[in-house]
Image (cartoon, rainbow, N blue to C red):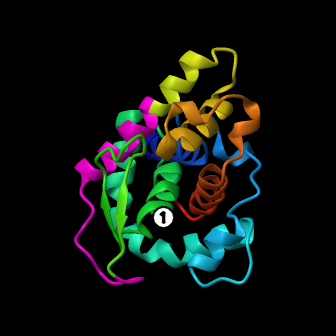
Amino acid sequence: MFVLWLLLGLLALTDSSEGSSWGCYGDIQTLDTPGASCGIGRLRGLSYCGVRASERLAEIDKPYLLRYQHIMRTVGQKYCVDPAVIAGVLSRESHGGNVQVNVDNAGDGIRVVQDPGLYAPTSQISEFQVSRMIEVLIVRIKEIQRRFPTWTPDQYLRGGLCAYTGGAGFVRSRQDLSCDFCNDVLARAKYFKRHGF
């Protein structure tokens, strides 16, 4: 009986440490971010901006993203990316699966979003689509790593997020690490991390 309790305790420790902070690209819980710009808040009907707006948008998208939590965990393990970051990107890009996202390259950017109507249900997001989005993010992070080899993992994550839609050329120095996409995604990711993603 003692062995069973010991194994259950070790399993609980493993689960809690994995859920608290994992991923090869920094610890999102330690990152400061100003959150969404006022323009992003207004696009979704909010009269405020910043972390409060990002968290509200994440809260709105959360019920839809819960459907994909197992996919985010699988893709996160495959690419060593925190599932909360994946949830943040999905929330920003597709409102939790409520707009269609084409993950093919569009010029130097990554996606073309076609909004059939705010919160209108669309087809399911597949593991392939999530994998493709995260592959693009990883490519951008690795481009930033090659260009700035002395930066920290946190800076690589920020750089990859800022380069996600605009290409690696968008990031020329540390001053470019505070783009709206990155700030909003990180604030949403921190919210999702606190809510079990």
User: Label 1 belongs to which residue?
Assistant: 91
Say which quarter of the image contains residue 119: bottom left
Residue 109 position in % (x across, y down): 42, 45
Q: Is residue 149 left or right of residue 122?
A: right
Residue 30 position in % (x across, y down): 74, 43
Q: Residue at x 53, y 61 (%)?
A: 196
Residue 82 seen by the camera: no
Q: Is residue 48 left or right of residue 84?
A: right
Give the vertical position of 127 relative to 13 (above or below).
Answer: below
Give the vertical position of 45 relative to 110 (above or below).
Answer: below
Q: Residue at x 76, y 36 (%)?
A: 175
Q: Residue at x 72, y 84 (%)?
A: 47
Is residue 130 within the magenta segment? yes
Say which quarter of the image contains residue 112: bottom left
Type of residue at label 1?
Ser
Residue 124 position in % (x across, y down): 24, 68
Q: Residue at x 56, y 61 (%)?
A: 192
Crowd class of label 1 (few under 14; some 14 to 19; many from 20; radius 10 Å) = many
Front one among 121 and 162: 162
Residue 18 seen by the camera: yes
Q: Residue furthest front?
A: 107
Report the magenta residues as a range.
117-139
Is residue 164 within the magenta segment? no
Say which quarter of the image contains residue 159: top right
